[in-house]
Amino acid sequence: PSGRILYLLGASGAMPVIAEGRWWTLLTAGWLHAGVMHIFFNVLWIRQLGPEIANLYGAGRMIIIYTVASIIGFGLSTAMYASPIHLPFFGGAYLTVGASAPIFGLLGALVHYGNRTGSSHARQAGLQYALIMGVMGFIIPGVDNSAHLGGFAGGYLASLLLDPLKPERIDHLAIAVGCLVVTFIAIIWSVIT
């Protein structure tokens, strides 16, 4: 899709968030993709990580982690683009979409699970996947490394609050449904406005 269509559907980045005041795109951008290959690889990662994180944390908490990672990932990308300090490979984005920021959040949750439970296998798997995807971000042009870094941090921080050693509660499920409903409304709002 063109940049204009992505913008209309809820792409995030410095232009929508800062220039246009479309702050809700921090929620919507994690559900959009810039092409067939982009969605293909993100779906592969979600297919690999989603069931695992849902198994470790519960389905509701997985959705919360995904949502928080999206907000923090795209928020950091927006902030880095608008910052007067521009770091190589971490400059943020003018316009950005994709599930990779929340996917990095799932990796952050996997690393936290390993740290919390003492599972070196989970911790190493999360770090190795993040390293592999991170290296790809330095090789492939146009990758939003700031969103990836923010997503990882967001997933890790959310998982700190959603202790994986405690069972999932009904309020986690209610918050997850709330995350999905608010995101759906944000997508509709992007199209309407």
Image (spheres, grey):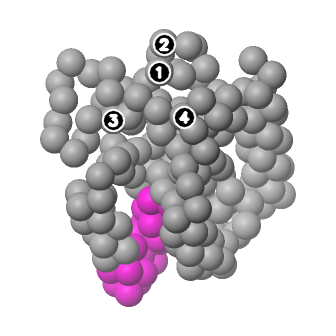
Q: Is residue 17 visible?
A: yes
Which of the two marks, 2 or 4, is nearer to us in this view? 4
Which of the two marks, 4 or 3, is nearer to us in this view? 4
Query: Foreground residue, 165 or 99?
Result: 99
Q: Quadrant of the C terminus?
A: top right
Query: Foreground residue, 15 or 78?
Result: 15
Task: Tell me residue 172's x, y (percent).
Answer: 75, 54
Q: CA distance from mark 2 to mark 1?
A: 5 Å
Badge 3: how crowded within 10 Å, few (<14), some, or many (20+)? many
Quadrant in the rendering for residue 23: top right
Answer yes or no: do the residues labelled 2 and 1 have beta carbons within 8 Å? yes
Residue 166 in the magenta stretch? The answer is no
Give the residues in magenta.
102-127
The mark that comes first in sequence, 2 or 3, is 2
Where disc 1 sits, the SS reads helix
Residue underneath mark 3: 92
Answer yes or no: do the residues labelled 4 and 1 have beta carbons within 8 Å? no
Residue underneath mark 4: 3
